[in-house]
Every structure is written in structure tokens, then in C-alpha cells.
Image (cartoon, rainbow, N blue to C red):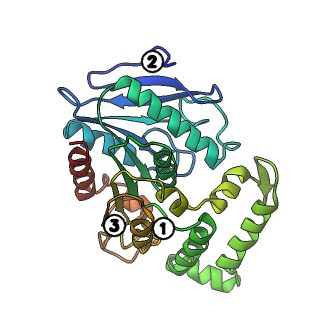
Amino acid sequence: MTAPHVRTTDLESERRFEASDGTSLVGALARPEGEAVAAALLVPGSGHVDRDSDHKRMRLGVTRDLAAALAGAGVASLRYDKRGVGASGGDYLSAGLSDNVADAAAALAALRREVPGRPVVVIGHSEGGIIAARVAAEESDLAGVVLLATPGVPGEEMLAWQARQVAGALPPFARFMVRLLRVDVVAQQRRTLDKLRASTGDVIRIQGQRINAKWHRELMASDPSRDLTRVTAPVLAITGGKDLQVDPDDLERIAAAAGGPVETWRPADLTHVLRDDPDAPSLGSYRRLLRQPTDAALLDRVATWVVAAAR
């Protein structure tokens, strides 16, 4: 049952709801001016991020910007702090992908209680897209699903592709140091994944750092295509041509796997952080890109599609 509201503003109010294991999760319900034509659940990406998709070292703001764009189009939305982050209870490091899926399902139920009788769309970015597909596979009455920078291949395959792209897109000085120290980035990642795969606990230490091992094991074993075959709701999938973390060609795999109609869009300069970059893609450019808001064309495309899907 939804607990009393924690904080209220004119069009956005804080909501508290319970996960299936009793963990208290907290998020923000954003309403449009006037009556909502639809409702959207916004699922954040990977990492220690809050309801706005913000990390203490990287303020991504994707779900915050999506909520504003959707409200402007007449769509209510719920976004939430991941467990162990922000105002939500629980422990972030011990949570697996399966726990994050269960939390999203609880958030969807909370959204339906808040905006009853309205068509509902689930929107996920990165890991959030994997979660959105899995939640949608269990839901027969969604109006639509939006997958932003979402892989269409098994997690282990995605991570291997990601390592190859990152190794080839390091800044010049980093590339020099990697060559100087004879570091094989891809092989190093493979060794780390082998340790994670062989682990049995929720959390392990690798090179002195505590790692969410359960999440990594479940991510490596995940396969979005298996979930997509059971998704009959319309799907909008968007991945940028300069994404270094998800293969843009996965758009074709998503379209082939989904059980319902699929619309794809591959903006040439869009990066994984959903900002355009006219330069060669590089992880080192993220901090510069995040000085600007989420790409306006993407926000407009998503909001317009959600309204149309809700009709």
C-alpha cells in the first residue's frame, strides 16, 4: 500500500511505495497541467542513480528531463530512487537485476493506483530498458514500451562489445598509457567478468573495491530478446549512432524479436547519455556533454510517441 506523501509541490509530489520484499522505495509523481491523457513509468539506467538518473559524480538527468517533456505533452509519470539510493531503503550493492525488475513492477503498480484508468507506458534507459522489457513481458495491457539505448543481445555479449568500443575510443593520453603499460583492456575486463561469474555472494571485492556481484551475474545471463518475444505492446526503440555502451545495430535485433509493432530511430550523433556529440565518440566527452540537457529532439519524439500510443 502507498504510504503518505512525503513532499508536495504544484505539479510534482513525492511518493513512497513498497517493493515486494517490503523495502520502502521513494519517487516523484509528475503531473501535467490539466487532466493526464496517459501515464508513464520511468526506469533509470545502471549505477548508483536516483529518480533523476543522477549519480553523485555524473548528473545525467535523463528521467527528470523525460518527466518534464511528458508533462508538457499531458502525460503523468512516476520515477523513483533505486533501492539504497536517495530516499529509498535497501542496499544498492546487494541488489541484483532481478531485484531491480521487481522494484520496477512495484513502481508500475503504484503508478496505476495514482493515475487510474489511464493508458500506461513503460520507458527505460540502458539497464532500465532491459528492466522495462522484462516488466512488459509480464503485462498484457500496456499501451507501449520505450527502450532508450537498450541492448538487444545477452548481457555478456553486450559487455564484450562495450569493452571493445571503449578500448578503441580512449582519449589520446589514456591510449598512450595503455600502450606504455601494455594493458589489454578487453582481456582485463574478461578476467573481471570471470571472477564475477564464479562468485556466489551478492557482493565481492575485486582489487579492493566492493562490486555488486549478483547484479553482474544476472546481467551477464540476461537476454532481452527472450523478454521481447512476449511483449505485444507497441515498442519505440532509440539508440544513437555514437553509443559506446550499446551496439546501435541492436535496434534491428529488437525489431526482429519483439512480439508487437516496433518503431526504431538511430540518430547519427546521439550518444549513450542521450546527448548529441558532433565529435568522435569518447567516454571522456560525457562530462562536457552533460552540461547540456537531454537531446530535445529525442524528448519530443518520445513524448509524441507516448501520446499517440495512448490513443
Q: Residue at x 67, y 36 (%)?
A: 91
Q: Position of residue 45 (x, y in %)?
A: 49, 51
Return the residue nearer the eye: 187 or 197.
197
Kind of element beneath mark 3 = loop
Q: Quadrant of the C terminus?
A: top left
| In-image side of 92 versus 144 (left or right) | right
Q: Which disc, if any, is residue 6?
A: 2
Q: Position of residue 104 (x, y in %)?
A: 51, 39
| In-image side of 84 versus 69 (left or right) | right
Disc 2 + disc 1, Cβ < 8 Å: no
Q: Residue at x 50, y 77 (%)?
A: 169
Q: Residues within 10 Å of mark 3 (few under 14, many from 20)?
A: many
Q: Position of residue 289 (x, y in %)?
A: 36, 61
Q: Residues within 10 Å of mark 1 (few under 14, many from 20)?
A: many
Q: Position of residue 89 (x, y in %)?
A: 61, 29
- On the image, which quarter does residue 174 sit in? bottom right
Q: Is residue 66 above or below residue 283?
A: above
How far separated are the C-alphas under marks 2 and 3?
36 Å
How far separated are the C-alphas under marks 2 and 1?
37 Å
Q: Is residue 238 above or below residue 133?
A: below
Disc 2 + disc 3, Cβ < 8 Å: no
Q: Residue at x 29, y 69 (%)?
A: 267
Q: As shown in the figure, which amino acid type bears the numbered disc 1?
A: Val
**Nearer to us: label 2 or label 1:** 1
The residue at which mark 1 appears reads as 246
Q: Earlier in the sequence, mark 1 or mark 3?
A: 1
